[in-house]
Image (tube, rainbow, N blue to C red):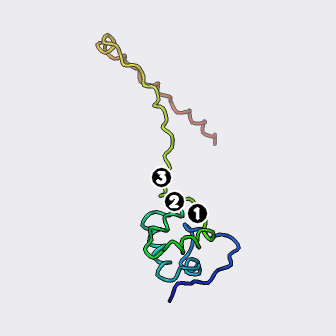
Amino acid sequence: MEANDQTTTMVTPLDLNQATYEELEALPFIGEVLAQRILDYRQEHGGFSSLEELRDIPGIHQTAFEGLQDLLTLSPPESPEVAFEPPEQPEAPQPPLPSPEEEAAPPEEVAPPEEVAPPAAPPAPRP
């Protein structure tokens, strides 16, 4: 298919970083081959950062570039997703280290817990 040289009536400019193959192919001066080259370039470079980058695509000559400028717009290129990293939390304060005297002292003996006797059983009923 030959490049589409007819003028296209567009209500709003086409976003070069979001346009589909079909939308690009419908533009004047762009046919099947250039539409695919634009998509390939966008994929390889992570999107267009300026309309001037269209000139880097083989087959887009000066006349085509000038005719396309008013039909295109540019959203920021998609950036790779960045994993969310929560802000660093300050470390909990550590208890102070024992002094050499405390380390040398024998450990305090802790008394075992008191045993609690189970409650007494109620008296048996009389016959």
Are discs 3 and 2 less than 8 Å apart at CB? no
List the residue tagged with mark 2. Answer: 49
Residue nearest the viewer, comparing 42 with 51: 51
Q: Which x, y percent locates residue 79?
A: 50, 57
Q: Secondary structure at mark 2?
A: loop
Determine crowd level at label 3: few under 14, some 14-19, many 20+ residues with C-alpha closer than 10 A: few
Q: Nearer the viewer, residue 117 or 57?
A: 57
Instruction: Give, as a three-letter code, the residue at label 3.
Output: Ala
User: How far, Cα to Cα, is label 2 from label 1?
Assistant: 8 Å
Where does residue 5 sit, x and y in percent of width and height?
58, 83
Q: Earlier in the sequence, mark 2 or mark 1?
A: 2
The mark that comes first in sequence, 3 or 1, is 1
- The vertical placement of 85 against 6, above or below, is above
How many angstroms separate mark 3 from mark 2 (CA)? 23 Å
Q: Which residue is mark 3?
A: 83
Tell me whether circle 2 and circle 1 mark residues in contact (CB < 8 Å): yes
The quadrant in which residue 67 appears is bottom right
